[in-house]
C-alpha cells in the first residue's frame, strides 16, 4: 500500500505563480488593509469593496498557471497516497493534477449565500456583483473563510493529518490558526519535512527535515529525498 503523504501548503507555493500574499507587504493585501478585505467585519462594513476585491483576485487567478512545485506534488501521486491540505483559495493544485485537495480557507472559484454558507455554487472566474442573489434570496458572497469565521474543513484536516505517514509543510508561516495547529496532530514518529526559505512562526519537532528553499526548488529536493527513503 502506498504511504499516506499529507502536505500542508500556504501562500509561498502560489507566490511563484504570481499570486500575491499579504504577509509579505506589511499587513497590506493589494494595497488594502487585511481587516478590510479578509474579515467578516469587513464584509459587514463594505460588501461592495469585498466583492470588487475578490473579483480582482479571480481575474488574477485566471491569468496564473501552476508552477513546478504544484506539478511536482501532483506527480508524487504515482508513489504515494497524496492528500493536500491548503490554506490557499486558488485552484492551482487541482489544475496541476492533484486529486485530493482540501481547502481550509475556501475557494475563489465558488460563491455562497451570505445567509447560509452551505449553499455553494461554482462560478469559475466570473465576477460577483452587488444584487447577485443566492438560491435563498440573499446576496451572493465569495466562498472564502475570513478572519472571524469558523473553519469547517478543520475536522477533515485533522483526520487526514492524524493518519499521516509522512507530513510535509510548504510555504506557510504557521502563524494563522487553526491551520498552524495541525502540526500537533501529526503522529509520533511520523517524518516531517518543512520547505521554506524563512523561519516559521512556531516550534517543530527537532527531527523535522528543513529544506531552506522556495517551493519550486524545495519540492524537487523533497522528491529526491522521498525516492531515497
Image: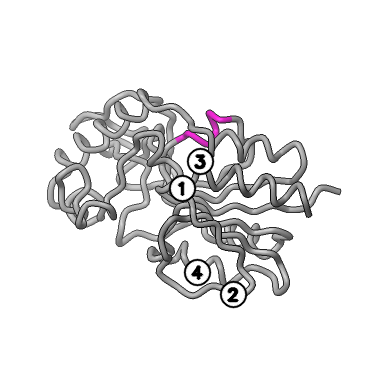
Q: Is residue 95 magenta?
A: yes
Please give the residue where the numbered disc 2 appears in the rendered image: 205
Q: Which element type, helix, strand or loop, lies under badge 4?
A: helix
Distance of label 2 from label 4 (alpha carbons): 13 Å
Label 1 close to label 3 by CB (< 8 Å): yes
Q: Residue at x 50, y 49 (%)?
A: 86
Split into 4 quadrants, where in the image is the C terminus?
bottom right
Badge 1 crowding class, 10 Å Cα cut-off, few under 14, some 14 to 19, many 20 or more, is: some
Q: Can you tell which of label 4 and label 1 is closer to the viewer?
A: 1
For the residue pair 96 and 15, the one nearer the viewer reads as 15
Q: Is residue 20 magenta?
A: no
Please give the residue where the numbered disc 1 appears in the rendered image: 214
* Sequence-first disc among 1 and 2: 2
Q: Position of residue 193 (x, y in %)?
A: 61, 60
Please give the residue where the numbered disc 3 appears in the rendered image: 216
Which of the 4 quarters of the picture holds residue 119?
top left
Question: Which stretch appears magenta?
Answer: 91-96
Distance of label 4 from label 1 (alpha carbons): 22 Å
Badge 2 crowding class, 10 Å Cα cut-off, few under 14, some 14 to 19, many 20 or more, is: few
Q: Position of residue 27 (x, y in %)?
A: 21, 57
Q: Magenta residues: mostly which secondary structure?
A: helix
Please give the residue where the numbered disc 4 appears in the rendered image: 181
User: Image height check: is 181 above or below 47?
Assistant: below
Amino acid at each position: 500500500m502506498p504511504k499516506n503523504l499529507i502536505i500542508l501548503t500556504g501562500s509561498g507555493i502560489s507566490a511563484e505563480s504570481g499570486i500575491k500574499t499579504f504577509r509579505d507587504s506589511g499587513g497590506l493585501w493589494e494595497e488594502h488593509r487585511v481587516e478590510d478585505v479578509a474579515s467578516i467585519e469587513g464584509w459587514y462594513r463594505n460588501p461592495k469593496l469585498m466583492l470588487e476585491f475578490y473579483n480582482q483576485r479571480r481575474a488574477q487567478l485566471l491569468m496564473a498557471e501552476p508552477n513546478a512545485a504544484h506539478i511536482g506534488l501532483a506527480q508524487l501521486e504515482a508513489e504515494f497516497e497524496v492528500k493536500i491540505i491548503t490554506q490557499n483559495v486558488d485552484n492551482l493544485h487541482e489544475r496541476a493534477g492533484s486529486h485530493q485537495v482540501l481547502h481550509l480557507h475556501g475557494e475563489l472559484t465558488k460563491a455562497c449565500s451570505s445567509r447560509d454558507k452551505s449553499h455553494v455554487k461554482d462560478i469559475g472566474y466570473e465576477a460577483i456583483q452587488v444584487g447577485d442573489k443566492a438560491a435563498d434570496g440573499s446576496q451572493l458572497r465569495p466562498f472564502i473563510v475570513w478572519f472571524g469565521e469558523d473553519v469547517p474543513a478543520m475536522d477533515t484536516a485533522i483526520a487526514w493529518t492524524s493518519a499521516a505517514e509522512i507530513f510535509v509543510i510548504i510555504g506557510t508561516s504557521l502563524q494563522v490558526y487553526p491551520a498552524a495547529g495541525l502540526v500537533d496532530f501529526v503522529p509520533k514518529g511520523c517524518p516531517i519535512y518543512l520547505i521554506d526559505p524563512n523561519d516559521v512562526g512556531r516550534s517543530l519537532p527537532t527531527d523535522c527535515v528543513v529544506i531552506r528553499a522556495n517551493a519550486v526548488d524545495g519540492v524537487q529536493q523533497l522528491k529526491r529525498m522521498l525516492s531515497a527513503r
